[in-house]
Amino acid sequence: MVCNIDYQDVLKQHLETKADVTMVYREVRQGDVHFDRCSTMTLNEYENVVAVGKNIRRKDVGDKGRKNISMEMYVVKKELLVDMITDAVATGENVYLTDVLHYASAKYKVKGYKFKGLVRCINSTENYYRASMDMLDENNIVDLFFQDRVILTKVKDEVPSYYHPDSVVENSLIANGCKIEGTVRNSVLFRRVNVAKGAVVENSIIMQNGDIRENCSLNCVITDKQVIITEGTELKGDPKNPVVVDKGTIL
């Protein structure tokens, strides 16, 4: 789960409500495609969690109604957590820790904490691709990285990216150290990516040290680090099934 959340707010509610367990959740549209196979929570009018299930998106439902997606974030005392795990091991009823916490609603006071910010679930290649493309929306970038809690990543200084006078760059995130001589549209380029003359990169994610050589055409492609796409190569995927190229591959 990718989000920018202040756990102090969650802890404050946990203490004020004297809950045994507090589960963080996000209310989403019924048809939201970002949270397939995630856990869902049913709450009563007092924000008590009464049941936990699985999100299986039905095409016939569309956007009618809303559902509560568990963000897999919990507040619970260590002593109680140890007791819950010990009971689960003794009975053999639950194998995973998340199941232990989810089934706590039947025995303990479990409260829900409603998070209202941007959340993306990265549990598949398709969802990773969708979440990355969502970052091309300035509102999403600000929500995730530039709130009161600024996200600071590891500093790796590079020279500024170079844009050839004949290059075309539209609606893209370009890291430093890149050399752009071709065309880049609706894409995310990591550090030190080379896009040669005549190459076209669209709707794609190119990780560190990617080398896209002359007259290549990439659409809906994810390349891992240090990938070389040789001259004239054409790769085309789909937003639901992007082409993925493994680290260090030469095509």
Image (cartoon, rainbow, N blue to C red):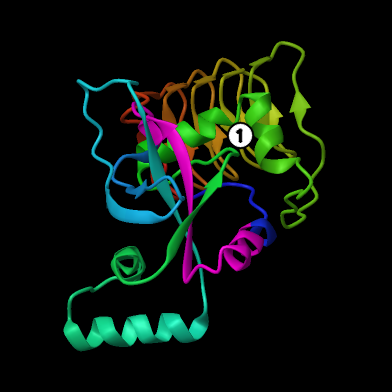
Residue at left offset 18%, top offset 84%: 91
Residue at left offset 59%, top offset 45%: 208
Does residue 149 appear left or right of residue 55 in this picture?
right
Residue 251 visible in the snapshot: no
Closer to us: 234 or 184: 184
Residue at left offset 54%, top offset 22%: 214
Element on which disc 1 rests = strand
Closer to us: 125 or 225: 125
- At label 1, which amino acid type do we have? Leu
Q: Quadrant of residue 67?
A: top left
The verdict on residue 27 being magenta is yes
Does residue 56 appear left or right of residue 208 in this picture?
left
The answer to whether residue 82 is above or below residue 159 is below
- Residue 27: x, y in percent? 46, 38
- Residue 88: x, y in percent? 26, 81
Q: Give neighbour class at mark 1: few <14, some 14-19, many 20+ (Cα, 10 Å).
A: many
The magenta-colored residue range is: 10-34
Closer to us: 251 or 11: 11
Residue 96 visible in the snapshot: yes
- Residue 98: x, y in percent? 35, 66
Does residue 106 appear left or right of residue 246 in this picture?
left
Residue at left offset 40%, top offset 35%: 34
- Residue 131: x, y in percent? 49, 35
The answer to whether residue 50 is above or below residue 208 is below
Closer to us: 163 or 155: 155
Q: In the rendered image, which residue does mark 1 sit on?
A: 189
**From the image, which quarter does the C terminus lie in?**
top left
The verdict on residue 235 being magenta is no
